[in-house]
Image (cartoon, rainbow, N blue to C red):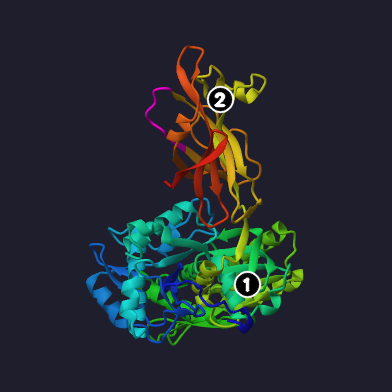
Amino acid sequence: MATDNRRPPYSGSTRKLIISIDVGTTFTATSFCLLQPGNIPKFEEILRWPKQATPDAKVPSVLYYDARGNAQAFGAETEDEDTIIEAEENGWIKAEWWKLLLRPAHLPIIQDLELPPLPANVTVDKIFVDHLRYIKNQIKAYITSTYGSGSDIWDTLSQTMYVILTTPNGWEGSQQNRMRQAAINAGLVDQDGGRRVRFVTEAEAAVLYAADSGSVEDWLVEDGHLILCDCGGGTVDITGYKINAVKPVLKLEESAASRCYLAGAVFVTQAAKSFFKERLRGTEWDDEERLQRIVYHFDRNAKKKFAEGDSACYVQLDGHKTIHDLGIMRGRLKITGAEMESFFAAPLQKIEEGLEIAFENGGRLADKVILVGGLASSPYVFSKLVAWGEEFGIIVSRPDGPTTKAVANGALAWHLDSSVSSRIAKYHYGISVRVAVDEGDPEHRNAGRTRFTGLDGVHYVHGVWSGIVKKNEKIEATKEFSRHFNCDMKANTTEFDHTVTLYAYRRGTPPTFMKFPGRHTLVPGYDVVCTVTGDLRNCFHATGYKTSPSGTRYKNINFEVCLSLGETEITARLRWKENGHRIYGPATVAYD
């Protein structure tokens, strides 16, 4: 951390524990911060993991399960030779790349990805729970063995600690909800402590780490603009930022909507695996177990070392055979430079496209790109992106030091500093409303539209889009967006809970009607984000009675749904008027 960018001493009166967990597609890293009154916050990484040959801040996001669905090995244990032999003897099944199974349906994959099947009797939610429980146990072991009073620290502070989980830019409320429940089930927080589980995007955490590291200090100029590109194992996250202030604390705002692409390092691995499978078809290496070992060696050697200009790379096979026709020399398979480049082609294309879109959305104000993440550490990827930047007059750089822990440490900085003051809406957000029938509108006259008569005697049509936030709109962290509602309730009603569905439209301009005539399916581009439910009992009692044309007594309830979208999570509450004053009531946000 740069000396002149240090945080002030913690001003709280009691100790607090904050932990951050970055569960990546291929690797996981975790950090923690023990806040002590009067002391400057210090970030510490977990560097000791069971069965780890050399201390490292990251461990594989891999587990072994037995036939009954019980987790038997975790993290670095899954790479230990003794564990691998035990797994083979007992028929344990490896679970890897499982994070991608949580992805939102609207996120496109750059090519067909053959995700490894889950073990029998195991769901992705169970894997999250088992993995987070393992992480929690390692954090506990690290703190209790590192601090003199570690056991007391953990027993006292773990009951109220905050847990910061990172997510790709494209993960939304549904994914966050499942991760929060996994954290609860893993014992990181209790059932009532769900609010102490918070989420930050990997890109946002990464840019804060880069600022903390001091390696991009010259780039942190007030009113400057930059793009953060986090090239991870499964996803690539790209976000543009404007620098509003540097001292006394860093303050940023999004200048381009954050974007997420399923185009990370596993797609390089997948392309290589397909190549090996075809090249070695009909040989002694043509079986899944041996193929997996070949891919393992590729991931840890050729993939990491390959640089532009290399004429060839070699991957270790079992044995010492030489087969000239296949390019195998003494048990090593030769891969030409052109073949290696083909493995990286699709992810690189998607990264470059994403960077260009980020600059276009931000008005090409930025002239710098910060690269972090495992794929960015590839010499080949880095050199190609530097060359891309030179073509467009853009500086591309990687922060010094190990970027593998960038996100975990940056997540702690996000929680402590609240550095990002505003974000850009990635999509249109809104609700479905009723409107009075307009006989002059052909869409309203369409026989397939649902029409009904309200208690007030007015003819209405259902399913009309009402926007709350527009795509690319600036969202202040503290700003609340609202939309007026009204609904009719009979005078003798006893049901006061009212539910409103929040939708996103992910394309250009939202169509007026959200569903096709005569069908119950949403028009392409519309997706359900969540439902917001609130108790309108007090609003009901504060509203006067009316009588319908048919003589039915009812009340026309007027209220607003207020949404806060400036953080990575959506929060909501209801608002109405009583005696001329605005009254707020709670609301709950739920995901399917």
Question: Tag on residue 249?
Answer: 1
Horizontally, residue 548 falls left or right of residue 365, namely left
For the residue labelled by badge 2, is the local secondary structure a helix, a strand or a loop?
strand
Q: Amino acid at mark 1?
A: Val
* Crowd tier of the residue under label 1, counting other residues whose Cα lies within 10 Å: few below 14, some 14–19, many 20 or above: some
Residue 114 image point, x, y percent: 44, 61
Q: Residue extending furthest front?
A: 579
Earlier along the polypeptide chain: callout 1 or callout 2?
1
Residue behind mark 2? 461
Question: Tag on residue 157?
Answer: none
Residues 138 and 565: in front is 565
Q: Nearer the viewer, mark 1 or mark 2?
A: 1
Q: Residue at x 24, y 64 (%)?
A: 67
Residues 196 and 400: in front is 196
Residue 266 image point, x, y percent: 49, 68
Horizontally, residue 156 falls left or right of residue 276, namely left
Q: CA separation, marks 1 and 2?
A: 52 Å
Q: Residue extending furthest top?
A: 550
Residue 161 image point, x, y percent: 40, 68
> Where 68 falls versus 371 (above or below)?
above
**Which region shows up in magenta?**
491-499
Magenta: main secondary structure: loop
The quadrant where residue 384 appears: bottom right
Q: Amino acid at mark 2?
A: Val
> Where 74 falls versus 585 (above or below)?
below
> Where 519 falls versus 5 (above or below)?
above
